[in-house]
Image: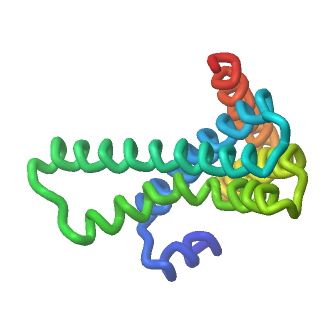
Amino acid sequence: MSASRRQAAAAGLTPDEVRAHLKERIYGAFACLTTLLLLTRHPGHGTTTDAWTAAFDVALALLGLWAASLVAEVLAHLASHGAGLSRRDWAQMAGATWQIVSAGVVPIFLLVLAAVGLVEFSLALGMGVAAVIVSLGLFVYLAVRRTPIPTWQRVLLMVLLMGVAALVVLLKAIAH
């Protein structure tokens, strides 16, 4: 059993639950990154008010996506099972979908630091973008490292996945 499977088993998560958590975390990272990139295009004047507004914007974007994802999960469950949700189902769905919001913890923290004057606003935005990109790269690495393919193919797969991620962010930024 691999180390990541042992950790998931120790946490009481099935492979499907791990997949759901990871999927939602990646959705959240894309939403957070897109919001941060849009804020860098219109940074305001770098005041503490701008930093509070940016932190609120990121939080609101992620909370909105979380709510939409939770509603989608509930509706999909109702449609596929024809029955209401058990407490365990609610807990699993809430735990998985909450990963969306967790993607914004570091960027929001950095923006709060800017809001209280400890970091420059533009630096907080840049560091937030970098933190989300690094986390995406880490999740790509963690997913790809478990595949039973040669190292050069894992590296190529990582590059391709990060390229697709960059394309998604670029398309979302162009659309806004």
Q: Residue at x 72, y 62 (%)?
A: 109
Nearest the viewer among 116 and 171 is: 116
Q: How many marks?
A: 0
Task: Evaluate whether residue 119 shows in this view.
Answer: yes
Q: Residue at x 76, y 31 (%)?
A: 163
Residue located farthest toward the bottom when viewing the structure as drawn: 10
Q: Quadrant of the C terminus?
A: top right
Is 128 on the left-hand or right-hand side of 61?
right
Task: Evaluate whether residue 137 shows in this view.
Answer: no
Q: Quadrant of the N terminus?
A: bottom right
Residue 83 x/y as whole percent: 10, 54
Q: Residue at x 74, y 43 (%)?
A: 50
Residue located farthest toward the top when viewing the structure as drawn: 175
Residue 146 higher or lower than 66, as above or below = below
Residue 60 x/y as whole percent: 53, 46
Is 75 on the left-hand or right-hand side of 36?
left
Nearest the viewer among 154 and 25 is: 25
Residue located farthest toward the left when viewing the structure as drawn: 82
Is 15 on the left-hand or right-hand side of 54?
left
